[in-house]
Image: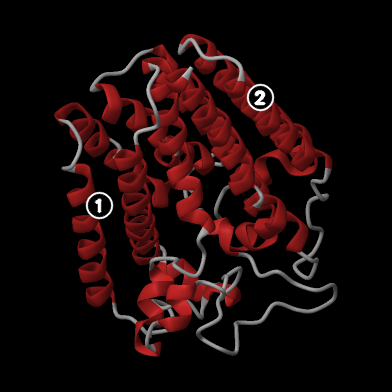
Amino acid sequence: MTKTASAVPRSGGTAREAPADPLRLPDADQRSLLFRLAPKSWAPFLQLARIDRPIGWWLLVLPCWQSSALASVHQGVLPHGRDLLLFLIGSIAMRGAGSTYNDIVDRGIDAKVERTRGRPLPSGRVGAPAAVVFLAVQCLIGLAVLLSFNRFAILLGLSSLGFVGIYPFMKRITSWPQAVLGAAFAWGGLMGWAAALGSLEPAPVLLYAGAIFWTIGYDTIYAMMDVKDDAIVGIGSTARFFGRRVRAGVACLYAVSIACVAAAIFAAGAGGLALAGLAGFAAHLAWQVAHLPAPAESLDEDATPALRLFRSNRDAGLILCAGLCGEAVRLALG
């Protein structure tokens, strides 16, 4: 995720400190089975790949699944199980590759910020050459998955690398790095349809647009946890751009997302359960906006509410995906 997406959940009045245990980094989920079972020597590499932060690959795979399900609705067939599994594997690998690349590029910035000094690269637990090798291995896994699809999907997938490549640098020159992140993270909104049909139509393009605005919205919530640190380091974010109007900003972004997804559903000829999924998705996003905390006034304010809202987007995306899959099943069996 973004540079701003690694703030430490804090209790009120407690100053930020680098984690005493190097195996526990900010906003990590230590419940990950792989992280708990793997040898401790693997921990720095699992942290580079964000295995201890599964929300990242969830948010990467969900647009893929939604797009694939929308294609199934359009075709009137059952969901493409093989594609859904491949997208899951590819998303885990490419989320890890993207995070590793981001950490390699940002290791100088990370070393200057107390909350990120414990990361594998700035802390010295992994050297840059080893990180580059690890990045290459993850990219090869992602490439193997991509090559399992048709030629059109392969070329489309490769074309997303431009956004991935420039993203780490955007926070240095713009207040809208989340827009570039959205363009990269939402690419699955095109890929699911392309893998199923070998082409693109208005429906997946509209779904992709909706996923971009969704990503900008939820990553703005993520960035709220770190506006003070970002100001100190001198990097931009939409949370800093919106300032005290962040709730209105996120609400507008989510509203555009909902409108685009609705247009995609109608363009694909869907209805019924797909619209029910959209209604649930919209209700969840409205709930997030209603519970959005005020921007932090100090470094010591509790970031937990924003972190929880950000992570809840997995459920929002699953609701929409379930509606689309349910509609595909209904049409295929009806």
Considering only order in the chain, which callout, 2 or 1, is on the residue closer to the N terminus? 1
| Gap in angstroms between the C-alphas marked 1 and 2 | 33 Å
Query: What secondary structure is found at the residue carrying circle 1?
Result: helix
Q: Looking at the rendering, which quadrant does residue 215 occupy?
A: top right
Asked if residue 266 is positioned above or below residue 321 in the image, the reply reads above
Which residue is label 1 attached to? 142
Count the marks: 2
Determine whether, in the image, residue 98 is placed left or right of residue 294: left
Badge 2 local density, few (<14 within 10 Å), some, or many (20+)? some
Image location of residue 37, percent across then percent down:
43, 82
Determine whether, in the image, residue 92 is placed left or right of residue 291: left
Query: What secondary structure is found at the residue carrying circle 2?
Result: helix
Asked if residue 295 is positioned above or below residue 176 in the image, the reply reads below
Q: Residue at the spot x=50%, y=70% of the render?
A: 52
Asked if residue 201 is positioned above or below residue 8 in the image, the reply reads above
Q: Residue at the spot x=62%, y=29% of the render?
A: 277
Q: What residue type is labelled 2?
A: Ala
Task: State whether residue 165 appears in this view.
Answer: no
Image location of residue 193, percent across then percent down:
34, 26
Image location of residue 182, percent across then percent down:
48, 38
Determine whether, in the image, residue 304 is placed left or right of residue 124: right
Q: Residue furthest front?
A: 334
**Front-most of residues 276 and 185:** 276
Which residue is label 2 attached to? 276
Badge 1 local density, few (<14 within 10 Å), some, or many (20+)? many
Image location of residue 19, percent across then percent down:
60, 83
Q: What residue type is labelled 1?
A: Gly
Q: Residue at the spot x=25%, y=69% of the render?
A: 134
